[in-house]
Image (cartoon, grey):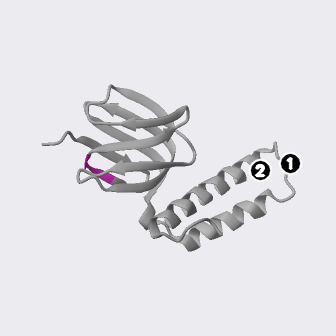
Amino acid sequence: MASELHLRVVTPDRTIIDRKVAAVSFQGVDGGYGILPHHAPLMTAIGSTGTVKITELDGKQVDMFASDGFAQVQANVLTLVCEAGEFAHEIDMERVKAAEAKAREKMVGLDRLSEEYIKAEASLRKALMREMLARKNTGTGALS
């Protein structure tokens, strides 16, 4: 029997995943993390835009978007608690394009150091990351 890691990804809306996997990698605020079974205890923040790469028990790779939260490894369980998250195949491109356009519109004419600009820029980064993951998942290539 291969080593397994229990992965749990939770958002305010739902539990996205709660099952055994082979490995997980994700972007923390201080760098990238690769989590294998029996990883040492860990607690870290997850950045505002990131990709979670899940290696299933059969070796298949699955991508998901996760943002704004934290990760904890304890007793061979990796828990990601995120403000937002979804599998790449769940991403609605129309919603992503609307979010991108709205963020770009908000940024026009704002001081680059203003709070409004910084928030709009973060929204734009999230939209672009979600679009990239969706396109990668469908094989439609580079961003348009």
Quadrant containing the N terminus is top left
Q: Which residue is painted at 55% across and 35% down in the image?
A: 29
Disc 1, disc 2: CB below 8 Å? yes
Q: Residue at x 46, y 38 (%)?
A: 70
Residue at the bottom extreme of this rendering: 94
Q: Quadrant of residue 6?
A: top left
Numbered tag placed on residue 117 in the rendering: 2
State whether residue 34 is above or below residue 50.
above
Residue at x 45%, y 42% (from the top left corner): 26
- Would residue 71 be found to the left or right of residue 20 on screen? right
Secondary structure, mark 2, is helix
Q: Is residue 14 visible?
A: no
Judged from the image, the secondary structure of the residue bearing numbered disc 1 is loop
Quick check: can you spot residue 28?
yes
Q: Is residue 14 left or right of residue 19?
A: right
Residue 99 x/y as whole percent: 64, 65
- Residue 144 location (% of width, % of height): 65, 69
Q: Taking 21 as reference, is 44 left or right?
A: right
Q: Is residue 121 magenta?
A: no
Whether 19 is among the magenta residues is: yes
Which residue is denoted by mark 1 in the rendering? 111
Q: Residue 120 at what x, y percent from top left?
A: 71, 54
Magenta region, main secondary structure: strand
Mark 1 is surrounded, within 10 Å at the Cα level, by few (under 14), some (14 to 19) or many (20 or more) other residues, namely few
Query: Which region is colored magenta?
Result: 17-21
Under mark 1, the amino acid is Asp
> Residue 95, percent across and down?
57, 70
**Tag count in the figure?**
2
Residue 124, compared with residue 78, is above or below; it is: below
Badge 2: residue crowd in 10 Å (few <14, some 14–19, many ≥20): some
In the rendered structure, which amino acid carries the disc numbered 2? Tyr
Q: Single out the residue that lies furthest toward the left.
A: 1
